[in-house]
Amino acid sequence: LALWDPEYSAPPIQTPEGHEQYWTRIERAVQALAERIPPASGNAALFTHATPALSLGYGLCRNLFASLQDFVEQQPIGIAACGIVHVVRDGRTGFCKELHPVDNSAFQALECGRTTYSLKRYSARPGKYWRPPELAMQKELEGAYGSEE
């Protein structure tokens, strides 16, 4: 049973990509993953870059965290190139049961050049991984009432 269409081609990402574009893209990706990989399908592996991997992990498992800040501050170390984010979902509901700490063993074993770990203190970049809560609320209000521009 194929869960993902191997012929699917994503549209190119406009560069440079700003925060709003990134947040929208990640929110859509989380929704697509939840829809395309049914809870009872078993394990799945997602391959992506470091920052999007943490963003997808948070998006799929935000039910485990009090806030985005809580998620970022619970990460013991940043994610590196080849970093692994292990998500465990409930086989019936699809809700996240566990989000394991980042596994950078491949990066460490392969000595991936001069790439460094990607993790900033929440206060340094609150929007690095996901739309900050205060901006999410603003976007919802604009959607409901239209923007003031």
Image (cartoon, rainbow, N blue to C red):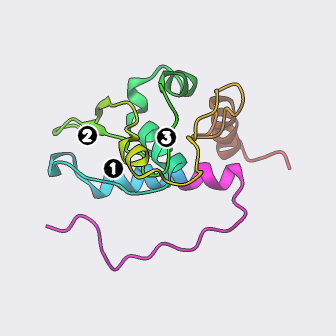
Q: Quadrant of residue 129?
A: top right
Measure how far apart labels 3 and 1 are at the Cα level: 22 Å
Residue type of the residue flagged with mark 2: Gly
Q: Residues within 10 Å of mark 1 (few under 14, many from 20)?
A: some
Q: Work out whether mark 1 precedes mark 2 in sequence or the reverse, and give the earlier one.
A: 1
Residue type of the residue flagged with mark 1: Ala
Q: Which residue is mark 1?
A: 34
99 vs 18, left or right, is: left
Residue type of the residue flagged with mark 3: Ile
Q: Is residue 6 magenta?
A: yes
Residue 118's disc is: none
Q: Which residue is mark 2?
A: 94
* Up-down relation of residue 10 to residue 127 (above or below): below
* Up-down relation of residue 77 to residue 45 (above or below): above
- Residue 133: % across, % down: 62, 30
* Up-down relation of residue 43 to residue 68 (above or below): below
Q: Quadrant of residue 99?
A: top left
- Residue 135: % across, % down: 69, 36
Q: Secondary structure at mark 2?
A: loop
Q: Residue at x 22, y 37 (%)?
A: 93
Q: Work out whether mark 2 precedes mark 3 in sequence or the reverse, and give the earlier one.
A: 3
Residue 79's disc is: 3
Q: Residue at x 39, y 28 (%)?
A: 63
Q: Which residues are magenta?
A: 1-25
Q: Work out whether mark 3 precedes mark 1 in sequence or the reverse, and give the earlier one.
A: 1
Circles 2 and 3: CB atoms closer than 8 Å: no
Q: Secondary structure at mark 3?
A: loop
Q: How many marks?
A: 3
Q: Residue at x 55, y 54 (%)?
A: 113
Q: Secondary structure at mark 1?
A: helix
Q: Residue at x 35, y 55 (%)?
A: 46
